[in-house]
Structure formats: structure tokens, C-alpha cells
Image (cartoon, rainbow, N blue to C red):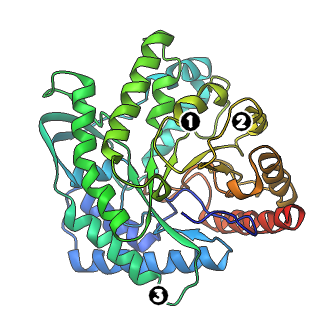
């Protein structure tokens, strides 16, 4: 994994808005209606080429495919894991959201309604048999599309996201949750290895860690800690043998644009996050509930071989962050952990579910990326 040796390099988290033409065909597929498979494949490949070029043009150094071919950063696994059944269902609210939703029911009633803008119906997943990986062809298509898109462009490095092992649906097969999650991890390991063997950095998308640790009104702190450690154990088992400098972890708070007054402090998350065998850690910072938490690293020791990817542009607001503020925040982190161990990133993906109306308008995303690149340039002048 490339690090900031003579300047601050830039990246983001992965998902980006899909073009309308692609969304239209993805919607037909997701709803089980007839669609042109060749046309869909061509649209995805073209969209990946365009999105890589745009990332480079806006000044990003470490790029990805924008997850153009996925309807969701999570539910894509329905096409890649066997052992599940699924049915259409209502919006599934994670348990940790309940406290926040109960405090602001009017706001969240309206907010959750926005999910109707996504192209795919919500799915309720159930594990009914042994889980195995059946996505070898799909992941190789993702890899081939990204490799083709890199032709003729100059990038520092390339990453590809993949979901962390978790209970993607209720468990009706395995004897325990840890057995279930370990089996899911063993299946997803095939995807992890394919990505690394292709020469890309593997990004593990893991919102579940904070979800597990957050107060949910169902489990006490000791239970949540035990579950978090079991989750990390299953993830590390799935990552075994993969060099940590080929892995970066992204973890984030489940709620997007909202009051967020019930988010847990990042200082309570970081010690668990650092237990994951990765070389770099991506997390929310631009979110104003967490912008102050750079101070956390004065009290928590970052291992010498680890890198931070603080999110310096928000994924849930259409404000474009000022480059000077981005530079100030970079310097705050660099002042504690060292300039070589900071990569400028984003809070989360900008379209984690394929949607006609993502929270941040796609035209605004590109301005945010330009601001990130300019902020990194300003910070580099100060730090080197």
C-alpha cells in the first residue's frame, strides 16, 4: 500500500453515483423483469471507465471502480453467496438506530422514506443452508472492468471494496452466530484473495463493528464487547495470510444525514478497530459529530506500521468543504501520528445503494473531490 512519503495522497471510500442509463437497466434486473444482459455488461464497463477517469481528473490518487455494477455495498452478496433465501421487505432499521429514531421520529420518518429512490427493492435475507462463494465470475468481471479502465490513466494505486463477514440475514442453519459469521468470512475470503491477487488493495467495508458496539437497548456493554471481538476474530480469520499492507478497513456510523446525537465516541471504537489486521483504517471525520475526534490519537497509540485515512469530506451533506479546513484537519492528524501516516479520504461512500437521488448530488461529489485534492496540496506545502 502506497503511503504519503513526500506529499499527502488522496482517496475515497468506494461507491459513487451510477449514471441514469445504467440505473434503468439495473432496476429491471433487480425487480426480476426482462433486461438485456449484454447491454448491462457494456453499460457497467463503460461506467467504470468514465468514473475512473473522473476520479483522476479531480485529483484523486488512489481510485476504484465506484462499485458501478453493485446495487448495494452489502446486498450484492446475494449474487455471490449461496445458502440464502430472500424476500422483499420493509426498510430494515439496525437496532442501534432505534434510540436516535425514537428521539426524532418525525425527522426519521421522512428520512427513511428516501430509500424509495433506490433502484432495488429492499431484501430480507435468511441463511437457510451452508454458505459458500459462487461469485468467482462476478468478481473477475469487476476486476477486468477496473483493469481495463486503468489503461492510459496515471494513478498512485487502486483499491476495490468488499463486504466484511457478517450476519447478512437471520441465521437458520448454523449452531451459533460466531459459527455463522466465520462461515460467511470463509466464503468471502475467495473474493478477498481474488482482489489482492489482481494487484489491488483490498478494502473491507465494515459498518458492522460500530453497529455492534453502539447502544441498542438490547445488550449491555459486556455483551456488545464480546460480540465485537467475535466479529473481529471472524474477519481476521477470513483475512489470514493476506499481507496487512494490502488491506485497508473502512468502518462508519450507520446513520447518514441527521442529528446523530446518539453516535458513540470514536475513542471507544478505535481500540477495537485497531484489532483488525489491516494496514490502514478509514473512518468518519467530516461529520460534525466527529470532527473534533482527531484528539483521540493523542491518547491511543497507532502502531508503527499502520496508516490513518480520516474522512475529510462528508457523504451526507451537499456543502463542499473548504480546502483550508481540509488542510487544517490533515495537519492535526499529521501532528500526532506523523505526516507519512495520513491519507486524505472521505467519510463514507457517496451512493452505497444504487439510487436516482443519492444524498449528495453527483455533480457536488466531484467538487468535493477537487476540494480534497486542493486541501491535500495545501497541507503538503505545510508539512514538507
Q: Residue at x 74, y 35 (%)?
A: 293
- Horizontal and vertical percent position of residue 44: 36, 74
Tell me the CA gap for discs 2 and 1: 10 Å
Find residue 151 and name its label: 3
Q: Residues within 10 Å of mark 2 (few under 14, many from 20)?
A: some
Residue denoted by label 1: 253
In primary-sequence order, the first of circles 1 and 3 is 3
- Horizontal and vertical percent position of residue 243: 42, 55
Find residue 290 and name its label: 2
Find residue 66 and name its label: none
Q: Residue at x 67, y 75 (%)?
A: 58
- Horizontal and vertical percent position of residue 1: 53, 63
Tell me the CA gap for discs 2 and 3: 38 Å
Instruction: Find residue 148 and report its image quarter.
Output: bottom left
Q: Residues within 10 Å of mark 3 (few under 14, many from 20)?
A: few
Observer-nearest of 150 and 114: 150
Q: Quadrant of the C terminus?
A: bottom right
In primary-sequence order, the first of circles 2 and 3 is 3
- Horizontal and vertical percent position of residue 196: 37, 63
Mark 1 or mark 3, whichever is nearer to me: 3
Label 3 sits on a secondary structure element that is loop
Tell me the CA gap for discs 1 and 3: 35 Å
Asked if the residue under mark 1 is in contact with the one under mark 2, i.e. CB atoms within 8 Å, the reply is yes
Q: Is residue 109 above or below residue 236?
A: above
Answer with left or right where residue 86 lies relative to residue 328: left
Amino acid at each position: 500500500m502506497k503511503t504519503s512519503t513526500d506529499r499527502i495522497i488522496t482517496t475515497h471510500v468506494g461507491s459513487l453515483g451510477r449514471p441514469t442509463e445504467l440505473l434503468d437497466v439495473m432496476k429491471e434486473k433487480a425487480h426480476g423483469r426482462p433486461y438485456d444482459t449484454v447491454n448491462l455488461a457494456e453499460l457497467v464497463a463503460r461506467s467504470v471507465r468514465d468514473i475512473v477517469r473522473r476520479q483522476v481528473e479531480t485529483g484523486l490518487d488512489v481510485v476504484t471502480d465506484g462499485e458501478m455494477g453493485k446495487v448495494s455495498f452489502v446486498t450484492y452478496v446475494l449474487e455471490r453467496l449461496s445458502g440464502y433465501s430472500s424476500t422483499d421487505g420493509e426498510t430494515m432499521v439496525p437496532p442501534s438506530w432505534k434510540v436516535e429514531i425514537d428521539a426524532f421520529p418525525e425527522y426519521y420518518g421522512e428520512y427513511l422514506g428516501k430509500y424509495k429512490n433506490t433502484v432495488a427493492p429492499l431484501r430480507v435475507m435468511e441463511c437457510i443452508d451452508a454458505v459458500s462463494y459462487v461469485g468467482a465470475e462476478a468478481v473477475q468481471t469487476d476486476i477486468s472492468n477496473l483493469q481495463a479502465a486503468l489503461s492510459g490513466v496515471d494513478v498512485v494505486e487502486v483499491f476495490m471494496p468488499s463486504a466484511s463477514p457478517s450476519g447478512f440475514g437471520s441465521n437458520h442453519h448454523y449452531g451459533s452466530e460466531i459459527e455463522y459469521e466465520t462461515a460467511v468470512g470463509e466464503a468471502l475470503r475467495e473474493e478477498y484473495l481474488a482482489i489482492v491477487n489482481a494487484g489491488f488493495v483490498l478494502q473491507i467495508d465494515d459498518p458492522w463493528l460500530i453497529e455492534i458496539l453502539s447502544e441498542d437497548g438490547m445488550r449491555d456493554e459486556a455483551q456488545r464487547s464480546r460480540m465485537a471481538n467475535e466479529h473481529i476474530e471472524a474477519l481476521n480469520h477470513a483475512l489470514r495470510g493476506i499481507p496487512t499492507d494490502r488491506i485497508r478497513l473502512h468502518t462508519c456510523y450507520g446513520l447518514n444525514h441527521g442529528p446523530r446525537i446518539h453516535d458513540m465516541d470514536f475513542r471507544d471504537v478505535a481500540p477495537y478497530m485497531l484489532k483488525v489486521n489491516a494496514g490502514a483504517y478509514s473512518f468518519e471525520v467530516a461529520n460534525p459529530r466527529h470532527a473534533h475526534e482527531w484528539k483521540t490519537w493523542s491518547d491511543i497509540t497507532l502502531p508503527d506500521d499502520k496508516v490513518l485515512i480520516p474522512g475529510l469530506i462528508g457523504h451526507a451533506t451537499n456543502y463542499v468543504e473548504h480546502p483550508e479546513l481540509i488542510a487544517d484537519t490533515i495537519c492535526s492528524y499529521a501532528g500526532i501520528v506523523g505526516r507519512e501516516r495520513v491519507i486524505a479520504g472521505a467519510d463514507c461512500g457517496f451512493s452505497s445503494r444504487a439510487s436516482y437521488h443519492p444524498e449528495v448530488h453527483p455533480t457536488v461529489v466531484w467538487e468535493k473531490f477537487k476540494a480534497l485534492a486542493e486541501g491535500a496540496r495545501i497541507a503538503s506545502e505545510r508539512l514538507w
